[in-house]
Image (cartoon, helix red, strand yellow):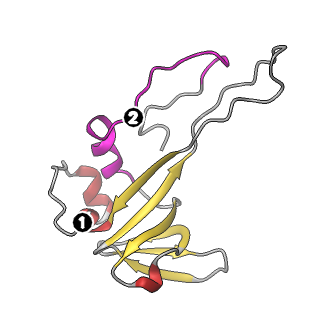
């Protein structure tokens, strides 16, 4: 995901890369990304029992994600009317020690929410498709 978002490791601790992640600039790139191997968590769903399910994507089909949970269970989560959340860790450079601090600066991870109804495509088709903004009438 770092390559998709053009994130780079800073060369020194005080370096400011100036990279701002916005929906307009990077939304289309994230929409066409391949989510195999990503850790997803179900944030909102019509079926209450699916909320809170967390796992790694092993299969991304047109209408569902297949996740492997921490208990080694395979769960098939339909994309329709489901909101998923995933995190991308912010790259950190080599730690340069100075007199004032002895620990690296803590940075927040990038957190994204994925509306499954907007991603009802096969991953191969999604990579070649140009995405257009749609209204979300179910929020």
Q: Looking at the rendering, which quadrant does residue 29 occupy?
A: top left
Q: Percent position (x, y) of residue 90? A: 57, 38
Q: Is residue 14 left or right of residue 84?
A: right
| Residue 25 in the figure: left or right of residue 87 | left
Between 8 and 134, the one nearer to me in the picture:
134
Q: Tag count in the figure?
A: 2
* Alpha carbons under labels 1 and 2: distance apart: 23 Å
Q: Secondary structure at mark 2?
A: loop
Quickly name the residue at label 2: 21
Q: Residue 59: image x %, image y %?
A: 45, 71
Range drawn in magenta: 10-33
The residue singled out by tag 1 in the image is 139
> Is 56 placed above or below 23 here?
below
- Residue in view at x 50 percent, y 82 percent: 75
Q: Position of residue 112 (x, y in %)?
A: 42, 51
At a point 59% along the width and 34% down the height, the residue shown is 91
């Amino acid at each position: 995901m770092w390559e998709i978002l053009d994130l780079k490791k800073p060369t020194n601790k005080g370096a400011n890369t100036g990279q701002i992640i916005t929906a307009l600039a990077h939304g289309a790139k994230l929409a066409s990304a391949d989510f195999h191997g990503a850790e997803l968590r179900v944030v909102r769903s019509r079926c209450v029992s699916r909320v809170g399910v967390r796992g790694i994507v092993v299969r991304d089909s047109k209408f569902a994600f297949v996740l492997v949970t921490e208990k080694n269970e395979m769960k098939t989560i339909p994309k329709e009317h489901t909101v998923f959340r995933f995190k991308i860790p912010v790259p950190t450079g080599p730690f340069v020690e100075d007199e004032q601090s002895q620990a690296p600066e803590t940075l927040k991870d990038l957190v994204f929410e994925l509306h499954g109804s907007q991603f009802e495509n096969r991953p191969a088709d999604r990579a070649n498709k140009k995405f257009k903004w749609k209204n979300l009438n179910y929020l």
